Amino acid sequence: MASLQKAKTRCMSGEVQFYHKEMYTWNTEKEWRGKERQRRSERERGRGYATSKGYWTDPYVQYFVRSVGERKAPEINRGYYARVQGMNHLLDAFLRKTKCDCQIVNLGAGLDTTFWRLKDENLMPRKYFEVDFPMIAARKIHNIKTKPPLSKPLIETHSTDSLLLDGHSLDSDRYCIIGADLRDIPGLDDKLKKFHLNPELPTLFLSECVLVYMTPDQSSKLVNWASVTFHTAMFVNYEQVNMLDRFGQVMIENLQRRQCNLAGVEVCQSLETQKERFLKTGWENADALDMMTVYSVIPQDDVARIERLEFLDEKELLQQLLQHYSICWATKDKLKLGLSQVAF
């Protein structure tokens, strides 16, 4: 109960950005898009702060984050660490299974730096696509154009002298940014085809705290489109879970006090409801783990290292936080690459 009250207090003050500032839905489209841009900036500042403390290495986040802002609580930093390590584990496993003969589509990518990590680690897929709202895509394109450490890797993987770019899209041989609304499936499909997304290639979809902004019908249509369009694919989704218990209700109540509502909370009831979204839309296999479980199965020598970085006096709060987030992954495998074996 004490840790629940502490989480409630932190939520009211806006401190627990790990799970609260990624859950906004808004009354008007203009207000919603503005807050979405704010949320993405807060997410990147949170990651920037965690990397500045040594939780993991990301030499590129500095080019997207002007400042890491105020100090983040240790449990928030550990939450970001678990999230990054968990998503990277499944991403890298998919690349190994396909021997990088594949493509990746990052839905709601924001200012994510995964492309540059994969380039540095020689894990490049055939092409890496990012999709986000046009205003967010434009900001990222501007950063890439004006920061040589970001633009140089694109040029190195491109075969001609010039990149195709405009205000809301950038296209090269191996990397593409597209400004689009994920709720507009025909528009999304058209834009991805325009930039040569290949439905015959094994394809990995990534989403982090994105589907929860959509209604269950909207998110189901998106994951169904992915299932219908690609015969060999994997979808990895990170978002809230266990939202029906008291801790989850506190999260929701505090959002409602700020006039924010979760459009997709119905799918966040349990690990089973997370899996059902995929199994009901044409995916062959689906699995899910809460982040506390993920935290316990990622390499424990590195977990021990990051736990020495900052003292944590409320381990129960960390556990409750991680139990209210999950990674769900689904596969279909016409090419029989063994994608169902990708797991933790």
Image: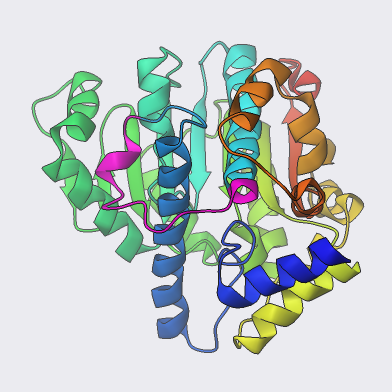
Residue 243 visible in image: no
Q: Which residues are magenta?
A: 59-76
Q: Quadrant of residue 343?
A: top right
Task: Identify the residue at image location x=21%, y=42%.
Answer: 144
Image height check: is 135 above or below 112? below
Q: Which is nearer the eye, 149 or 105?
A: 149
Main secondary structure found in the magenta portion:
loop
Specify whether residue 176 is in view.
yes
* In the image, residue 315 above or below residue 148: below
Q: 270 or 226, which is in the foreground?
A: 270
Horizontal arrangement in the rendering, residue 323 relative to residue 235 (left or right): right
Residue occupying image coordinates x 82% and y 50%: 316
Residue 138 in the image, given as x and y percentages of width and height: 26, 58
For the image, the number of numbered tags is 0
Answer with left or right where residue 288 lies relative to residue 134.
right
Q: Position of residue 19 (x, y in %)?
A: 64, 60
Rendered-image quadrant of the N terminus: bottom right
Asked where in the image residue 137 lies, by quadrant, the reply is bottom left
Q: For residue 252: magenta?
A: no
- In the displayed structure, 327 sits above or below 256; it is above
Describe residue 49's horizontal placement relative to residue 166 as left or right.
right
Position of residue 21 measured from the top left corner of the image (x, y, whole percent): 56, 66
